[in-house]
Image (tube, helix red, strand yellow):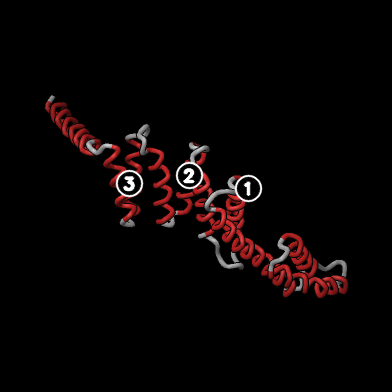
């Protein structure tokens, strides 16, 4: 009986503490949390901004600030360079609010998340390809957006990165005497990246590569 009494007292205090914490936290209304998040964001305290906006979104999902909170969570994660989390947050925002006026901005931000992960031409070009797809989607769906100019400049850099990677691989094949593979890469660059510096370089190497392919025995690659 005594053990049951002690257990009951412990449970009372535990639940009491929990209720106290919830009560303390819930004393912040939506406006206060929005202001707290905005202040933290302006001060570049992005982790605190994420917390404040997350609390706002979770506690007041029907508040007029809730949609703003969703967007600012993504923005704060972007500033923290947590690009995977930011992409998911931006994509969720677009899915939940497809007609919101911020959607063009969101698409551009998704593109920038990938763009900021681009590496040197000897590395995986997937970030550049993903960024290019998002920027192109922005141009196609929202040609009048204020973000179009920025997206266009980013597209040029993405293409340069992707074409550079293709040329790097082609040159590697040529160097290692895999002439057929090299020729295919050079021809691919010329076809899909016309007008680029990489295309001009590839075009100049095609005759040399073609001659080497013709000299090579049929059973060699």
SS of the residue under disc 3: helix
Residue located beneath label 2 in the image: 102
* Residue 79 coordinates in the image, percent (x, y): 41, 56
For mark 1, what is the residue?
140
Say which residue label 3 marks: 51
**Left or right: where 123 falls relative to 76:** right
Q: Where is residue 152 in the image (x, y as percent from the top left)?
A: 59, 58
1 to the left or right of 177:
left
- Tell us which disc is closer to us: 3 or 1: 1
Q: In this view, does 157 lie above or below 83?
A: below
Which of the pair 218/180 is nearer the observer? 180
Q: Do the residues labelled 2 and 3 touch (CB within 8 Å)?
A: no
219 on left or right of 31: right
N-terminal label among 1 and 2: 2
Q: Quadrant of residue 8?
A: top left
* Crowd band around label 3 with a 10 angstrom C-alpha radius: few (<14), some (14–19), many (20+): some
Spatial CA span between label 3 and label 1: 35 Å
Mark 1 to mark 2 CA distance (whole Å): 16 Å
Front-lying residue, 165 or 198: 198
Of label 3 and label 1, which has the lower sequence position?
A: 3
Q: Which of marks 2 and 3 is nearer the N terminus?
A: 3
Badge number at residue 176: none
């Amino acid at each position: 009986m005594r053990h049951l009494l002690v257990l009951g007292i412990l449970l009372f205090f535990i639940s009491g503490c929990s209720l106290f914490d919830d009560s303390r936290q819930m004393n912040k209304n939506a406006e206060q949390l929005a202001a707290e998040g905005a202040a933290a964001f302006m001060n570049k305290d992005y982790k605190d901004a994420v917390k404040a906006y997350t609390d706002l979104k979770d506690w007041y999902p029907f508040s007029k600030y809730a949609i703003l909170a969703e967007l600012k969570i993504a923005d704060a994660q972007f500033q923290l360079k947590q690009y995977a989390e930011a992409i998911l947050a931006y994509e969720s925002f677009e899915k939940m609010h497809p007609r919101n006026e911020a959607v063009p901005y969101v698409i551009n931000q998704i593109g920038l998340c990938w763009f900021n992960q681009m590496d040197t031409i000897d590395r995986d070009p997937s970030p550049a390809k993903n960024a290019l797809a998002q920027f192109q989607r922005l141009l196609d769906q929202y040609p009048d957006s204020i973000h179009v100019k920025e997206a266009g400049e980013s597209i040029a850099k993405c293409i340069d990165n992707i074409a550079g990677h293709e040329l790097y691989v082609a040159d590697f094949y040529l160097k290692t005497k895999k002439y057929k593979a090299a020729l295919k890469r050079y021809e691919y660059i010329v076809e899909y990246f016309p007008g680029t510096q990489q295309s001009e370089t590839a075009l100049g190497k095609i005759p040399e590569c073609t001659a080497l392919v013709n000299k090579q025995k049929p059973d060699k690659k």
